[in-house]
């Protein structure tokens, strides 16, 4: 209710450009790169033909990974608004896109990659938790904290995949016993090092199938089947059939 009332006073703007209509204006909607079939069955990387796994698959024990969007253009800017600019509602827009894009695997609980305490204090909310709660609302699945940060880790940005993974190992621990099937939510999947560290903690606590769901995804190499507008590294192909964004009529 309060959110709606605030909407009237401070109408939400496009999460991509910050100027057009919420959640993504027509220009930003057209520039979103949706990730769809045919793809790698395990990680959802678009592929010319369906494959069971690929070299972009996140490390075990992550069972599978899915994301509605390539981490580029408006999706990248929207994630940054969610993480760094206090646009908490962007989590709801991404949750809508997640449930519209693919079936959520049958799981016992939805949990998330917890933010470091210092960042949580700076930001006021945990963006991955906001995504997980949005997903729980839309699917009816229970949402529960299962993980905490075991120790603070250094900056990750300049580390390579293997190095990053080694650095992340042991950086999360389970807060309690985990059920057998879990959806693990994070904002972005890049190397999978963070997700793998979380999955290891969940597996040690009893989880057997850990499905990673993120708002967006980046890949080591450009995906040949994704045509990108404007000649960037990831040209786009156009809206994915069935992709629906809140506030946008189905196309
Ligand atoms: Zn826009
Ligand atoms: Zn894969």
Image (cartoon, grey):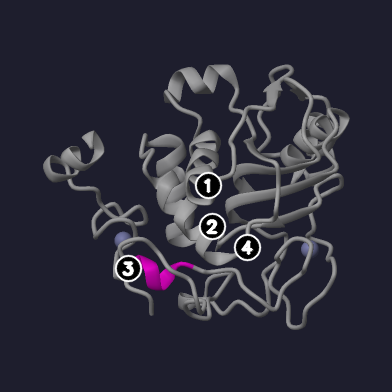
Q: Tell me which image quadrant ligand 2 sits in.
A: bottom right
Is 140 situated left or right of 204 in this image? left
**Mark 2, secondary structure of its residue:** helix
**Mark 1, secondary structure of its residue:** helix
Instruction: Give the alpha-carbon distance from disc 1 to disc 2, as whole Å.
Output: 8 Å
Instruction: Give the alpha-carbon distance from disc 1 to disc 4, as whole Å.
Output: 12 Å
- Which residue is disc 3 drawn over? 248
Is 121 situated left or right of 161 in this image? left
Task: Give percent across and percent down for residue 184.
Answer: 68, 42
> Start and end of the magenta stretch?
28-32
N-term mark: 4 or 2: 2
N-term mark: 3 or 2: 2
Give the number of the mark in front: 4 or 2: 4
Q: Which mark is residue 135?
A: 1
Q: Crowding near pointer 2: few (<14 within 10 Å), some, many (20+)?
A: many
Mark 1 Cβ and ligand 2 under 8 Å apart:
no
How many numbered marks, from 0 up? 4
Give the number of the mark in front: 1 or 2: 1
Task: Give percent across and percent down for residue 28.
Answer: 36, 66
31 inside magenta stretch: yes
Residue in the image at 55% along x and 40% along y: 132
127 inside magenta stretch: no
- Which residue is disc 4 drawn over? 103
- Which residue is disc 2 drawn over? 98
N-term mark: 3 or 4: 4
Q: Crowding near pointer 4: few (<14 within 10 Å), some, many (20+)?
A: few
Is 24 situated left or right of 130 in this image? left
Q: In the rendered view of the protein, which quadrant contains the N terminus?
A: top left
Q: Is residue 36 above or below residue 96?
A: below
């Amino acid at each position: 209710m309060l959110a709606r009332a605030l909407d009237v006073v401070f109408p939400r703007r496009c999460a991509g450009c910050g100027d057009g209509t919420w959640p993504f204006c027509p220009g930003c909607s057209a520039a979103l790169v949706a990730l769809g079939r045919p793809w790698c069955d395990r990680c959802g990387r678009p592929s010319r033909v369906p494959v069971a796994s690929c070299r972009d698959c996140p490390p075990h024990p992550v069972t599978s990974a899915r994301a509605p969007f390539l981490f580029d253009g408006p999706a990248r800017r929207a994630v940054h608004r969610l993480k760094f600019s206090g646009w908490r509602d962007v989590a709801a827009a991404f949750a809508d896109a997640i449930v519209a894009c693919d079936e959520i695997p049958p799981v016992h609980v939805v949990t998330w990659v917890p933010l470091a305490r210092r960042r949580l204090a700076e930001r006021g909310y945990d963006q991955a938790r906001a995504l997980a709660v949005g997903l729980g609302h839309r699917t009816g699945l229970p949402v529960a904290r299962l993980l905490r940060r075991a120790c603070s880790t250094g900056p990750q940005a300049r580390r390579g995949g293997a190095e990053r993974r080694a650095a992340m190992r042991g950086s999360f621990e389970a807060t309690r016993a985990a059920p057998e099937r879990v959806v693990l939510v994070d904002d972005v999947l890049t190397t999978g090092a963070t997700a793998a560290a979380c999955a290891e903690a969940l597996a040690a606590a009893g989880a057997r199938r850990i499905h990673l769901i993120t708002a967006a995804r980046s890949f080591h190499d450009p995906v040949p089947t994704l045509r990108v507008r404007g000649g960037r590294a990831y040209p786009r192909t156009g809206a994915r059939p069935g992709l629906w964004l809140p506030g946008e009529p189905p196309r």
